[in-house]
Image (tube, grey):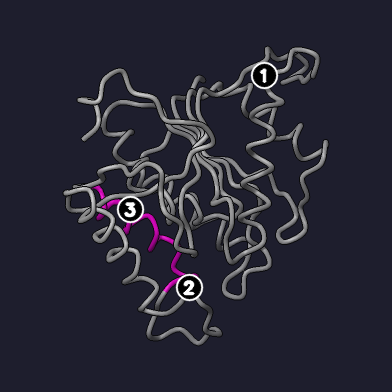
Amino acid sequence: MKLDVLAFGAHPDDVELGCGATLAKEVSKGKKVGIIDLTRGELGTRGTAETRDDEAFHAAKILGVSMRTNLEFADGFFVNDKQHQLAIIKMIRKYRPELILCNAVDDRHIDHGKGSKLVSDACFLSGLIKIETKDDGVIQKPWRPKQVYHYIQWKHIEPDVAVDVTGYIDKKMDAVLAYKTQFFDANSKEPQTPISSKNFTDSIIYRSRDLGRLIGVEHAEGFTVERYAAVDSLFDLK
């Protein structure tokens, strides 16, 4: 199955938080979208790897993506080496996405920056003909996505591109809140974390509203780019 967009997240819920509305919008426009989680989030303070598996499954259904899988790298301890790069290269060559979305280049959680660089490096290597990978015993053809975009997470990073996601923020929030063990629940007996407060959940909305305000729409999600974003005409810019 060829995808238009493939979104990577270091942990289940990263993609929903960072670019869930953008993915929902592309799905609604008929694009084929997939999600790959690098880890199962097994070191998370709240919930378990098993609950995160279930939550990720339900979040994917809400967003309407064509596929979701987990590479089961070690949460907190995966590294940017040949073994991990090859695992991602196999996925890129299997699904041949036009665009890849991945973690923020720098963030509070160490896995976010690591995952960002790992995926970015794998995207380049995936285009090299002398790197051989196989899928079900069949040699894969090289494939390099046209663009790699990094969504914004905990830290405030100025975006290079802002996507109008007006009308899709509710679906994003439904997908985020599918992770019931992770986010605000007044009745939860689990330890508090930086993302389990009501303030954090509220921030998802007010951050999208603020970025939307800056580009003249209701809601927006921001991305940073690795190379200049090109347009055919200045009139293509909104």
Residue that label 2 marks = 195
Q: CA distance from mark 1 to mark 3?
A: 32 Å
Q: Nearer the viewer, residue 176 or 55?
A: 176
- Residue 186 found in image quarter: bottom left
Question: Dot 1: what SS?
Answer: loop
* 120 in relation to 141, above or below: below
Residue interval drawn in magenta: 168-183
Q: Mark 1 sits on what residue?
A: 127
Q: Tags 3 and 2 in contact by the CB under 8 Å rule? A: no
Categorize mark 2 by other alpha carbons within 10 Å: few (<14), some (14-19), many (20+): few
The amino acid marked with disc number 2 is Ile
Q: Is residue 170 magenta?
A: yes
Q: List x then y, in percent, for residue 205.
A: 28, 63
Disc 3: which residue: 172
Nearest to N terminus: mark 3 or mark 2: 3
Along the viewing direction, whichever of 219 and 10 lies nearer the viewer: 219
Q: Residues within 10 Å of mark 1 (few under 14, many from 20)?
A: some
Instruction: Check if mark 2's residue and mark 1's residue have beta carbons within 8 Å.
Output: no
